[in-house]
Image: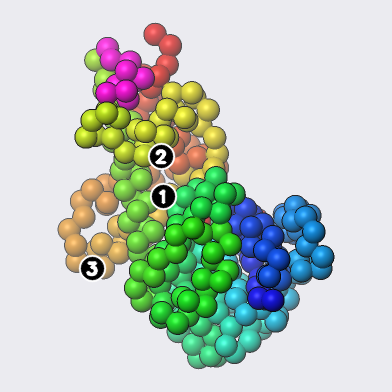
């Protein structure tokens, strides 16, 4: 039996934890700041037979766990759970591993890893892509940073929700790759929005434009999936908060700057999504950034004529 803990049961953390807890060879302690979410996830795992428990504190969750998984908004929240009598460090044993599935930042991860190493505890940054549906279907891609042996140990838990688990490099490599991936997502959402708003103004309907773009070289996941399913339908489901994509863009822009790579598009896109977050609020979905473009252009993409 592999003993694990999972902390952070938000939009993506909850389905990841559910899949982990459902594994018959895994015992899981669940902790969430708002306790009823942990109780709800525990109740959703049928036939757990005492393998799943709800923990009262991070330390309580970590006690006895070989692998402790976190999925929080940013690295700041992960660091905030480490200290104090109730903190993770009070519960984690020498030889255990913290597997951080947060889309965090590389510098914080290296700092956290150094603190854990002083106590003989391993660290892997293991952010995910694939969205909430990928998490439900256990089809996430997991980007791991850390030494090879520790990543191998983490794999036992990550395979419960990840179908593609890639060792990307040293500690922080997973977080750097995730931030760049999401910067590309944001660029595609924004530029597809600008393109379709322009075409609407020029008299081309968005569905016609997407039909052509998706058979041509301008296509992307945004044009093929996000716009048809979320913008043209005006559904804008809330699956991945704009505030979190804003955070990812800032990480990508910071990493590029730290590495001395000229990155005008990352920097500009980061500013644009910050504006969108300020305009639309922290609970808006990332695709809703398009509403700002629509407002500026005075058109609704896919709207009635
Ligand atoms: P949510 O905002 O839905 O959930 C955040 C979670 O963090 C909640 O469990 C919340 O607890 C907890 N939390 C927030 N602040 C604190 C704190 N100070 N102390 C303890 N717990 C805290 O986020 P997501 O689940 O969407 O995202 C989690 C991570 O995964 C982020 O880094 C995100 O970028 C990444 N991600 C998300 C994807 C998605 O599609 N949603 C896709 C890929 C990556 P509470 O319930 O009490 O508020």
Work out which residue is located at the far front of the displayed protein and give it: 24
| Residue at 39% from the left image edge and 46% from the top image edge | 274
Distance from disc 3 to disc 2, alpha carbons, whole Å, reads 27 Å
Q: Is residue 113 left or right of residue 293?
A: right
| Nearer to us in this view, 159 or 86 | 159
**Would you say the magenta stretch is mainly helix, strand or loop?**
helix
The residue that disc 2 covers is 276
First along the sequence among labels 1 and 2: 1
| Residue at 28% from the left image edge and 15% from the top image edge | 204
* Closer to the eye: label 3 or 2: 3
The residue that disc 3 covers is 259
Q: Is mark 2 within 8 Å of ligand 1?
A: no
The residue that disc 1 covers is 246
In this view, 198 is above or below 281: above
Distance from disc 3 to disc 1, alpha carbons, whole Å, reads 20 Å
Asked whether residue 47 is drawn in magenta, I would say: no
Across and down, in percent, residue 155 comes to 51, 71
In this view, 269 is above or below 36: above
């Amino acid at each position: 039996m592999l003993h694990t803990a999972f902390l952070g049961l938000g939009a993506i953390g909850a389905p990841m934890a559910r899949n982990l807890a459902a594994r018959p060879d895994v015992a899981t302690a669940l902790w969430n700041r708002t306790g009823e979410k942990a109780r709800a996830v525990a109740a959703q795992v049928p036939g757990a037979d005492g393998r799943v428990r709800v923990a009262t504190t991070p330390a309580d969750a970590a006690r006895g766990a070989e692998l402790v998984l976190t999925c929080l908004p940013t690295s700041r929240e992960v660091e905030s759970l480490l200290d104090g009598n109730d903190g993770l460090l009070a519960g984690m044993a020498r030889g255990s591993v913290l597997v951080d599935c947060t889309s965090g930042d590389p510098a914080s991860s290296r700092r956290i890893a150094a603190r854990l190493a002083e106590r003989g505890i391993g660290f892997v940054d293991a952010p995910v892509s694939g969205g909430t549906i990928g998490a439900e279907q256990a089809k996430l891609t997991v980007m791991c940073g850390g030494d090879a042996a520790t990543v191998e140990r983490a794999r036992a838990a990550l395979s419960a929700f990840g179908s593609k688990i890639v060792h990307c490099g040293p500690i922080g490599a997973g977080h750097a790759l995730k931030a760049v991936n999401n910067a590309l997502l944001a660029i595609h959402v924004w530029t597809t929005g600008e393109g379709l708003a322009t075409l609407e103004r020029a008299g081309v309907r968005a569905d016609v434009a997407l039909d052509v773009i998706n058979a041509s070289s301008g296509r992307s996941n945004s044009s093929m999936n996000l716009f048809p399913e979320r913008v043209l339908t005006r559904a804008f489901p809330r699956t991945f908060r704009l505030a979190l994509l804003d955070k990812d863009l800032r990480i990508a822009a910071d990493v590029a700057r730290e590495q001395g790579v000229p990155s005008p598009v990352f920097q500009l896109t980061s500013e644009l999504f910050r504006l969108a977050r300020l305009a639309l609020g922290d609970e808006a979905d990332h695709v809703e950034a398009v509403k700002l473009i629509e407002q500026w252009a005075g058109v609704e993409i896919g709207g009635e004529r």
